[in-house]
Image (tube, rainbow, N blue to C red):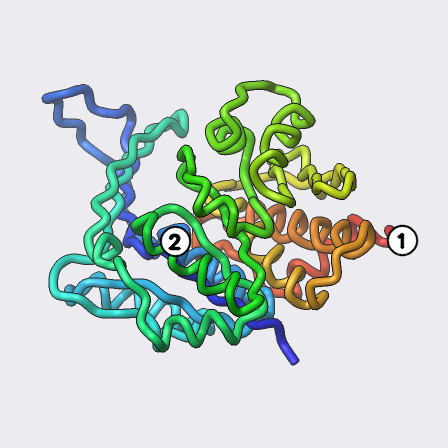
């Protein structure tokens, strides 16, 4: 039986323009290529989980515009269950992104329908209760994130929080988190300790949550928990093409692997989950695009086996 993951989060349509340089205030720049890409951290992680083999339900909101139809169809095409995806009056979430030739960018996000996800209904709560893992981020109202985590804790569902975008978090949420997933910038913000040393960041975060996964890009990932377990997992050696959604691929795959191991937490099972998640992130980075680059399970398995064969 496949793992069951519920994602409560955002979905946006990314409107991406490339240009020779970014405009200054009041300046108009003639752009080059334009593309639309389904995005939003919640939707990306739901797609990542579904492609990694989970039965995945998505709780979110889109507008009653053409973008909303496109975002819903993208999730369905990736195997995500969208029965808990509301359609509300008004615009869908949109991210306006300009990228110059040196890969510098600016991004302006209009939350749109995402900001209307202010409450969970009985069916949302039933979905969370039936899941192995609840996966959360911070692009919908914080009160909703807390509601979802509280429901999961009451029903024995594991709460995985990807604290992105970076924010200082209230104790009422941190007390409900089973696994916190952060990059170094997010770790510093949440933990209130600014350091280049992963061990220092992990120590600070363990004061707040029982288990921490620290993503380190091409260096892999580090793990620590309050039992004293510490792990450093190297990433596969690849030639990266686009790292945009690699973190979402990692987090979605981690949630799936954690769920498939039935909540058993040992050095062996945690290391295995982290290796598989690192393979997912690396597989994503080998392809251009964001949500379109999120890997299928076969691609994750292939890179995992090629990189970690023989690991316990």
Residue 312 as seen in the image, left or right of residue 210: right
Q: Quadrant of residue 213?
A: top right
Quadrant where the N terminus sits is bottom right
Q: Is residue 42 left or right of residue 197?
A: left
User: In the figure, residue 265 lies in which quadrant?
Assistant: bottom right
- Residue drawn at 31 percent across, 71 percent down: 121
Tell me which numbered mark, 2 or 1, is placed earlier along the sequence.
2
Q: Is residue 166 above or below residue 174?
A: above
Decide which of 265, 83 is in the foreground and name it. 265
Q: Which residue is mark 2?
A: 145
Residue sitting nearer the eye, 168 or 291: 168
Q: Which dot marks residue 178?
A: none
Residue nearest the viewer, comparing 66 with 3: 3
- Residue ID at (81%, 50%): 267
Which residue was labeled with disc 1?
Answer: 310
User: Few, some or many C-alpha atoms within 10 Å of disc 1 (few <14, some 14-19, many ≥20)?
Assistant: few
The residue located at (65%, 24%) in the rendering is: 200
Secondary structure type for disc 1: loop
Please indicate, yes or no, whether residue 232 appears anywhere in the rendered image: yes
Secondary structure under tag 2 reads helix
């Amino acid at each position: 039986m496949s793992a069951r993951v519920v994602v409560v989060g955002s979905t946006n349509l990314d409107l991406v323009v490339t240009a020779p340089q970014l405009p200054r205030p009041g300046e108009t720049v003639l752009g080059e290529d334009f593309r639309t890409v389904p995005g939003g951290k919640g939707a990306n992680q739901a797609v990542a989980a579904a492609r990694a083999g989970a039965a995945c339900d998505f709780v979110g909101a889109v507008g009653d515009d053409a973008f909303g139809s496109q975002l819903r169809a993208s999730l369905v095409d990736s195997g995500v269950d969208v029965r808990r995806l509301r359609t509300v009056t008004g615009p869908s979430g949109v991210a306006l992104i300009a990228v110059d030739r040196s890969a510098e960018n600016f991004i302006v996000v209009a939350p749109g329908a995402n900001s209307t996800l202010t409450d969970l209904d009985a069916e949302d709560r039933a979905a969370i209760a039936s899941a192995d893992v609840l996966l959360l981020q911070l692009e919908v109202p914080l009160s909703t994130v807390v509601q979802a985590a509280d429901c999961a804790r009451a029903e024995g569902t594991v709460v995985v929080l990807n604290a992105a975008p970076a924010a200082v978090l209230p104790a009422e949420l941190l007390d409900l988190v089973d696994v916190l997933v952060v990059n170094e910038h997010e770790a510093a913000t949440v933990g209130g300790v600014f350091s280049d040393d992963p061990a220092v960041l992990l120590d600070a975060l363990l004061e707040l949550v029982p288990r921490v996964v620290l993503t380190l890009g091409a260096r892999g990932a580090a793990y620590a928990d309050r039992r004293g377990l510490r792990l450093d997992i190297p990433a596969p050696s690849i030639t990266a093409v686009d790292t945009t959604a690699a973190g979402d691929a990692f987090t979605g795959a981690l949630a799936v692997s954690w769920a498939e191991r039935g909540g058993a937490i040992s050095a062996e099972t945690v290391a295995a989950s982290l290796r598989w998640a690192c393979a997912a992130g690396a597989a994503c980075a080998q392809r251009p695009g964001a949500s379109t680059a999120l890997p299928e399970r076969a691609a994750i398995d292939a890179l995992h086996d090629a990189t970690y064969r023989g690991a316990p």
